[in-house]
Structure formats: C-alpha cells, structure tokens
Image (tube, rainbow, N blue to C red):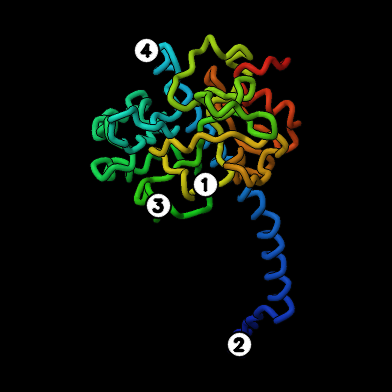
Amino acid sequence: MDRPCFPPPRRVLRGFTLVELLVVIAIIAALVALLLPAVQMARESARRTTCQNHLKQIGLALLSYEGTAKSLPTGCVGCKPQPPAPGEPFRQPLLRSWRLDVLPQLELPALHQQFLHDRPAYDAANRTAAATVVDLFLCPSTDAPELHAGVGLFSGAAFTDYGGVYGVEGPGNEAPLSAQQVLADPYLGVMLYEVPTRLRSITDGLSHTTAVAELLNRRTGETEWVNGHTLFAHEQSTPINGGSLLSNNIGSPHPGGAQALFCDGHVAFLPNELEPAALTALLTRAGGETP
C-alpha cells in the first residue's frame, strides 16, 4: 500500500521580543556598571605601582650619587639671588635642578653630557636637552596631557611630577634675610639652595625624612624637571592634597594621599589624614621630633 505523503512539519523560528531584548540590555548594563569600577581600580593600582617604582629608581640614584659625592646633590644651584661683587657684571642665575646631577645614575649619561652645566638651565644651548621627556620623572596617573611648558623662562622644557623637599613653611618658620636659606634650620628638608646635604646632618633619621614627593600642582609653571625651583616647602597647616597659596604642596591624583621617597631609599604612601605635626616631622631633617 502506498503511504500517504505528508509535508514535513514547519519549523517555527521565534525571535526575541522587545521586552526580552530590553531585559538583556539592562542586565548587560548592570554587569558593566559593576565591573567598570573594579577595572578602573585595577588600572589605578597599576599606575600607582609604576609611580612608586619611578620614585624608587630616583631614590637609588640619589644614594648612588651620595656614595661617590659623600652628600646628596644640591637642590638648586644658582636659585637664590646674589648681588654681584663690586666691579663684577651681573650673571644670570643658573637655576639648575638636582635632577641634572643624578642623570648618570639613572642610566642617562648621554643626556647629562648634552647639558652645558656652566650655563643656565633655561639657556638656548640647553633647550634641546631640557625638552627631553624623562618617564621616570612623571607619574602615570597624571591626567594632564601636557608634557612641555608652553610659556615662561623654561618654555619648551619637559615637566616633572615630583619635587625635592625643601622643608615646611609657615608663620615663624622663616630664616633671617642674611641667612643662606629662606627657612630656619628646624624647618629645612634635605634639598636646599646652593649647598648639598650630608647624610650625617639628617639627625631625624634617614627612614623618617623625605627627600622627594609628588607635587599637587603639576604640568604647570615651575614644574619643569631641569628647573631648580621645583624644590618646594609644604605649608605647615595644610594636609596632603590641600591647596596652598604660598607654593606647591604634596599631593597626587592617587585616591587618598600621595607618595614620597625617603632618604634611605624606601617609598611610602602618605595619607590625606596624616596629622600636620607628623607630616612636619617627615619633611624636616633635623627638627628633633620623636618618630
């Protein structure tokens, strides 16, 4: 017997309804909202680690320099105005930063040799070398895109995000006008004008005294890495990441604080909540504070 032929059953193709599509989109958006902060935190953690490593390399360079010179480098050479001797012509200030001295220790001897050290750091003969971007002097968390100064005496020079610690400024901390430094001795740090600091003069202890720290105001005037004026004195009454009308302060884009390099070579994260008295103790070399 012949069997009757029936057409094969049709497949019914069913797609997403609009409601189901909206539900899927909402779920994906919720997952992205949950994951995005974690991704951003992981990226910031990596950037902060890189910043820490940069400061660590600078610390090793400073200690290597000290091993040969028997002192830390002079914070700024030719920064404090000096009247010319009778009969002598006025000389342009050198404004040379301590960073120039540690370039060989940072494995940048060729850059060190490009500089004419007897001429000002902003001199036209030093312009090409000053424009060199040194990654070790930059924090990867900085969101400002500028890498070079656009105006001023150091126009064209590359920026840095780290400053040498000059000390702590505030009412009553000033030195007499006749003194070599602008702060009194108990409030001085280790990166000074015109004179180097020997380790034996850091009587508060190398592990309790900072040498370099992150700058709150960065990628702006007077934060060029060749510029000796990148020394800064933190305002005594101001917390970390607090603004100052006097000069630059310690601060960073890292959440909760900023990083600092100590004279023994270790790097520590200083929180915003650090008490002013404790911060002053860390920024001065011979304040006599109890650690």
Q: Residues within 10 Å of mark 4 (few under 14, many from 20)?
A: few
Q: Which residue is mark 2?
A: 3
> Who is closer to the viewer here, 263 or 72?
72
Residue plotted at (51% across, 12% down): 199
Residue 24 percent coordinates (x, y)? 69, 69
Q: Amino acid at mark 4?
A: Thr
The secondary structure type at the circle numbered 2 is loop
Instruction: Nearest to the eye among marks 3 and 4: give it.
Output: 3
> For the residues marked 2 and 4, what is the alpha-carbon distance in whole angstroms?
105 Å
Whichever of labels 2 and 1 marks the residue nearer the N terminus, that label is: 2
Residue 107 higher or lower than 252, as above or below:
above
Residue 137 percent coordinates (x, y)? 44, 37
> For the residues marked 1 and 3, what is the alpha-carbon distance in whole angstroms?
15 Å
Contact, mark 3 vs mark 4 (Cβ under 8 Å): no
Whichever of labels 1 and 3 marks the residue nearer the N terminus, that label is: 3
Q: Amino acid at mark 1?
A: Arg
- Residue 87 visible in image: yes
- Residue 1 visible in image: no
The secondary structure type at the circle numbered 1 is loop
> Who is closer to the viewer here, 7 or 208?
208
**143 left or right, relative to 108:** right
Q: Residues within 10 Å of mark 1 (few under 14, many from 20)?
A: many
Q: Amino acid at mark 3?
A: Gly
Q: Which residue is mark 1?
A: 218
> Who is closer to the viewer here, 71 or 172?
172
Q: Amino acid at mark 2?
A: Arg
Q: Which residue is mark 4?
A: 68
